Amino acid sequence: MSELEYPSVVGVAPGNGYSHVVTGTGQWVAISGQVALDANGQFVGRDDPSAQAEQVFANLARCLTAADATFENVVKLTYFVTDITHLPEIRVVRDKYIPGPKPASSAVQVASLFSPLALIEIEAFAIV
């Protein structure tokens, strides 16, 4: 299992709920963007960003498990959202899954995702 480090960066304002830099050694794991689809391919949480975030993070957890990893191994999350104002609700869910140091993160508002029902897509990179 890798040990991740979160070095402080001089001259850069502190991140709001994320780390600017995360380092570690080990096997690199890339997880494709996850959306709020359940195991049967049905959308969860229509028009509900909190419910969708819960499903997305549950899906990410399952993908991490398949790679013998946990959220403690995640070094980077990229959020694609159809409405950037959903970020506070997404962060509440994220904090349930990642209570400790936060990975490096980027958030991008997009015009749409692959389905009009999808409000959120999150991809992850981990080191195990």
Image: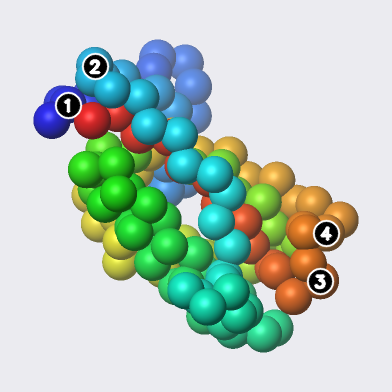
Name the image quarter holding residue 41. Answer: bottom right
- Mark 1 vs mark 2, CA separation in Å: 6 Å
Q: Are marks 1 and 2 in contact (CB under 8 Å)?
A: yes
Residue under label 4: 112
| Residue 67, image x, y percentages | 29, 42
First of labels 1, 4 by sequence position? 1
- Mark 3 vs mark 2, CA separation in Å: 38 Å
**Mark number for residue 25?**
2
The three-letter code of the residue at mark 1 reads Ser
The three-letter code of the residue at mark 2 reads Thr
- Mark 3 vs mark 4, CA separation in Å: 7 Å
Q: Are marks 3 and 2 in contact (CB under 8 Å)?
A: no
The three-letter code of the residue at mark 4 reads Ser
- Mark 1 vs mark 4, CA separation in Å: 36 Å
Residue under label 1: 2
Residue under label 3: 116
Q: In the structure shown, which secondary structural element does the residue marked by tag 3 occupy? A: loop
First of labels 1, 2 by sequence position? 1
Q: Are marks 3 and 1 in contact (CB under 8 Å)?
A: no
Q: Are marks 2 and 4 in contact (CB under 8 Å)?
A: no
Name the image quarter holding residue 88. Answer: bottom right
The three-letter code of the residue at mark 3 reads Pro
In the image: residue 13, left or right of residue 8: right
Q: In the structure shown, which secondary structural element does the residue marked by tag 4 occupy? A: loop
Residue toward you, 12 or 82? 82
Residue at 78% in and 67% down: 115
